[in-house]
Amino acid sequence: MPCSVARHDLNRMLDNLKNKKILILGLGREGISTFKILCQLFPKNTFCLADQSSNRSPPDSRTGWPRT
């Protein structure tokens, strides 16, 4: 059975994230994708990124791509 979220529920969840500090755990594919979309939706929010792997660079907040 597919998971469905009503549009008003999604809007309410997104409204709840405005002006909040957001922690993203894991900088794998999903973590970076989440960071990229949330930076676009909430450019004024503060983001904290955490990952167990010490060899990953945090993504650039402007582009969402890993720094080189």
Image: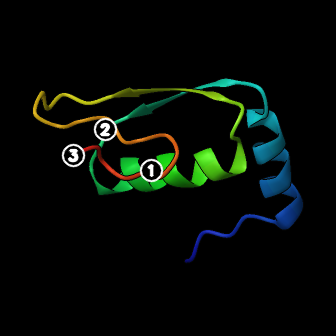
Amino acid, disc 1: Gly
Disc 2 or 3, which lies upstream in sequence?
Answer: 2
Neighbours of disc 2 within 10 Å: few (<14), some (14-19), many (20+): some
Disc 2 or 1, which lies upstream in sequence?
Answer: 2
In the rendered image, which residue does mark 1 sit on?
64
In the rendered image, which residue does mark 2 sit on?
26
Q: How far apart in space, not on screen, are marks 2 and 1 (Cα)? A: 14 Å
Q: Which residue is situated farthest in the right direction here?
A: 8
Q: Secondary structure at mark 2?
A: loop
Q: Is residue 12 above or below residue 24?
A: below
Mark 2 in CB contact with mark 3 (< 8 angstroms) = no
Looking at the rendered structure, the number of numbered marks drawn on it comes to 3
Mark 2 against mark 1, which lies toward the viewer? Answer: 1
Q: Is residue 29 above or below residue 60?
A: below
Q: Residue placed at 68% from the left, 30% from the top? A: 45
Residue 6, position as x, y percentages in the image:
81, 66
Q: Secondary structure at mark 3?
A: loop
Amino acid, disc 2: Gly
Q: In which quarter of the view is residue 24 placed?
A: top left
Residue 20, position as x, y percentages in the image:
71, 24
Neighbours of disc 3 within 10 Å: few (<14), some (14-19), many (20+): few
Q: Which residue is situated farthest in the front direction here?
A: 68
Q: How far apart in space, not on screen, are marks 2 and 3 (Cα)? A: 18 Å
In the rendered image, which residue does mark 3 sit on?
68
Of residue 8 and residue 62, the one placed in the foreground of this image is: 62
Of residue 21 and residue 68, the one placed in the foreground of this image is: 68
Amino acid, disc 3: Thr
Q: Residue placed at 28% from the left, 43% from the top? A: 67
Mark 2 against mark 3, which lies toward the viewer? Answer: 3
Q: Which residue is situated farthest in the bottom direction here?
A: 1
Mark 2 in CB contact with mark 1 (< 8 angstroms) = no
